[in-house]
Image (cartoon, helix red, strand yellow):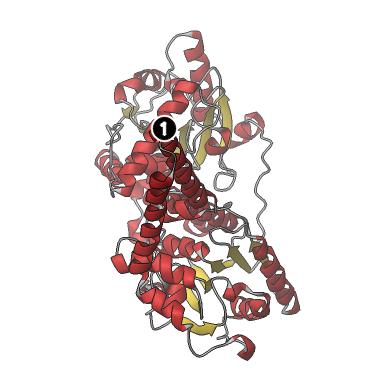
Amino acid sequence: MTSHKSENYSNYIFIVLHGYSCSTAAYRSIKVRLEKDFSGCEVLIPKLSMPIFSRKDPVEIVEVIITRIDARWTPGKRIVLIGHSCGAILARKVYLCACGKGKSDPYENKSTDIKSWAYAIDRIILLAGMNRGWTVNRHLSLFQAMSWEIGIGIGKILSMMGVEPLIFKFKKGAPFITDLRLQWLDLQKDSVVTGLGGAMVVQLLGTIDDLVSPEDNIDMITGAKFFYLDIPFSGHKDVILMDRSEKGIARYSAFHQALTMSAIEMASSQTSFTEPVLVQRPEVTDVIFVIHGIRDAGYWTQKVARKVKALALENNQNIELETSSYGYFPMLPFLLPVSRKAKVEWLMDQYTENYAKFPKAEFSFIGHSNGTYLLAKALTDYPCCRFKNVVFAGSVVRNDYKWDTLFEKGRVKAAINFVATGDWVVAIFPKLFQTLNVSDLGSGGHDGFTSKRNIELKYVKGGHGAAIQENLWKVIANFILTGDTPSIPEALKDDVQNVWVKRLGKTALLVWAIILLILLGIGILLWKSGPASPYFKSLILAFYLIGIWKVLTKL
């Protein structure tokens, strides 16, 4: 595409998608510039449902945009998609949907979903686009940092109430973002066959973006084929101001280059980065995740991984292991849905990066404790992910988890669940939430799952960590690599569970009540037996409460 004022561009539609909580009026200077330099073109800036307190589903917003394009496009017209901030994410999603890759479950995509105008999209321009989703930038000013923290706090409370704000759906690792990144990779894989997915994508990076970090702007995983250009004198918000001021002229110059330069010209002009470009390894056939649980540094995951790797070498299998850690996860954060969700988002970010790096590999999973929850929740919230073989140990997932649905859809091929004889941790704590039906935590590692198709291995002698002891590593490795039905070695097997742990599981609510009464009793005792001065009584009680808080948040 070239720009000559004497030419007629009546066959071009420029579609500008505004950012979160932005007005369409803020993009007036872009509209004026386009209409002047591309004579006869049509500039469409649809008003999107993205006010600051919006709870809209971004998929619904994309559907509205597609409907608008359907109404305006006619054969012979060319399209340029331009998105700012969150609008850049929406622009990519619109393109995916137009190319028939918009469904969260890739098996639901059909050729009939392809829009005729998908072939008419020349290029996509991303202005300060949050390609990986947003995270909190630790280098914000004091005022901005406080504003973000207050906003995030309110958002977390709303999310716990089941009312998730729109902006949280653009967060790094959120289902919408992860779906988009995985779908983009699939689009690139299939582009040779379908002829779709070849639109040039140019990301314009503000040189002084004070809201979005370079790590969130630049996605070398799914955006390895993007062209990146700096746009001078620009932060996250004013990158769209292309008026007649000195800075506005400089911004428009970069924007104009993004619109008109050829791929060859772009390659020689684009910004260089220190972040390494993704190197794909199609020879790898399997990627195995080994993920630890709560109150666990995760050192055992690397030892299990070495066992799996050794067995794979014996079988001439080319595999890779993912043993990344989400950090030490204490008890109290584990009990909070928002904290658990953040770890699921972390897992899916790892999944996406491995999916990009190993394009022909199948994925399998070994998880203990909270690691089992992360996978179960990911399979529930992210229809795009799928795993071949799954091992659960010390599972904290509800025992009525819908495994059968996953098997029927081919999202899991085989799964085993180790049930211990004395896993009092699962019997008392996660099972309480299942009994009260107030959470997706449960007693899979104590009671086993009710699903008919996954394999329950009952019972491994020991407690919460029984199934990840060294004597079982070979059993786990063999199943994860072959899918063959395993059995517990006789020396580690028992036919019945510990009777006391079974009773604790049946009376989990009573156990919790007793624990709370004991803690309350100690507090009352400290108050009554302490010094006569109310000041010292209050001080002792405060230290007691701080001690409880420390235990819950550190252990």
Q: Which amino acid does label 1 sit on?
A: Tyr
Q: In this view, does 11 lie to the left or right of 197?
A: left
Which residue is drawn at the image coordinates 33% and 41% (left, top)?
A: 166
Can you say whether 325 is above or below 464 in the image?
above
Which residue is drawn at the image coordinates 74% and 73% (left, top)?
A: 310
Question: Number of labelled discs?
Answer: 1
Which residue is drawn at the image coordinates 48% and 55% (left, top)?
A: 331
Q: Is residue 102 left or right of residue 368?
A: left
Q: Is residue 192 left or right of residue 307?
A: left
Q: Nearer the viewer, residue 325 or 133?
A: 325
Q: Residue 421 location in percent, x, y? A: 51, 81
Can you say whether 299 is above or below 230 in the image?
below
Q: Which residue lies furthest to the left in this view?
A: 71
Q: Residue furthest top?
A: 245
> Where on the picture, by quarter, is residue 527?
top left
Which residue is drawn at the image coordinates 47% and 24% (left, top)?
A: 3
- Let me know if residue 377 appears in the view: yes
- Report which residue position mark 1 lands on: 535
Which quadrant is home to the C terminus? bottom right
Q: Residue furthest front?
A: 532
- Let me know if residue 6 appears in the view: no
Q: Residue 493 location in percent, x, y? A: 57, 87
Task: Name the secondary structure under disc 1.
Answer: helix
> Where on the picture, by quarter, is residue 80?
top left
Tell me the crowding category of disc 1: few under 14, some 14 to 19, or many 20 or more residues within 10 angstroms, Cα based.
few
Q: Residue 128 location in percent, x, y? A: 48, 30
Q: Residue 393 location in percent, x, y? A: 53, 72
Q: Which of 360 and 490 is in front in this view?
A: 490
Q: Which of 240 and 142 is in front in this view?
A: 142
